[in-house]
Amino acid sequence: MDRDEILRRSRTENRGQDEMEREVDAKAGRQAAAVGLLACGLLFLTEQLIKGQTNYSAWIIYCVIMCTMELSRFFRLRKKHDLINGTIMLVCTVIFLALYVRRLV
């Protein structure tokens, strides 16, 4: 691929967004993930303390979202740590889903 082709593709990909906007979006995503983790933990602990039960549905949703984010990053950027994180989140999703289904049965 020659230089002009690379520049053309880059302009097409980045149309409508400047560098600052992309940086803000990335930071907002990281903050949302941290807040989501905190919210899931608080829901889990609250239900455990009040009812003495565990509900894994919030963890399933959180892990699916994180898995999607990490694997999407991997498919676009091809960074190994994104693949590892995405795979870990996928495994966590399967584990929480199995625990959730087991409680239903």
Image (spheres, grey):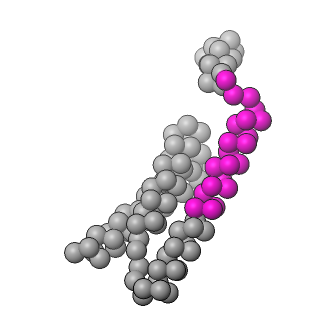
For residue 42, above or below residue 68: below
Q: Look at 42% across and 85% down and name the residue there.
A: 51
For residue 71, above or below residue 56: above
Q: Which residue, as the protein is rendered here, is positioned at the far top?
A: 4
Picture quarter with the N terminus: top right
For residue 24, above or below residue 88: above
Q: Look at 52% across and 55% down and name the residue there.
A: 66
Q: Which residue, as the protein is rendered here, is positioned at the far left?
A: 105
**Residue 52, quarter of picture:** bottom left
Span shown in magenta: 16-36
Question: Which sits in the foreground, 80 or 89?
Answer: 89
Q: Look at 22% across and 75% down and name the residue there.
A: 105
**Residue 91, quarter of picture:** bottom left
Question: Which sits in the foreground, 10 or 55?
Answer: 55
Q: Is 24 a magenta residue?
A: yes
What secondary structure do most residues of the magenta stretch adopt? helix
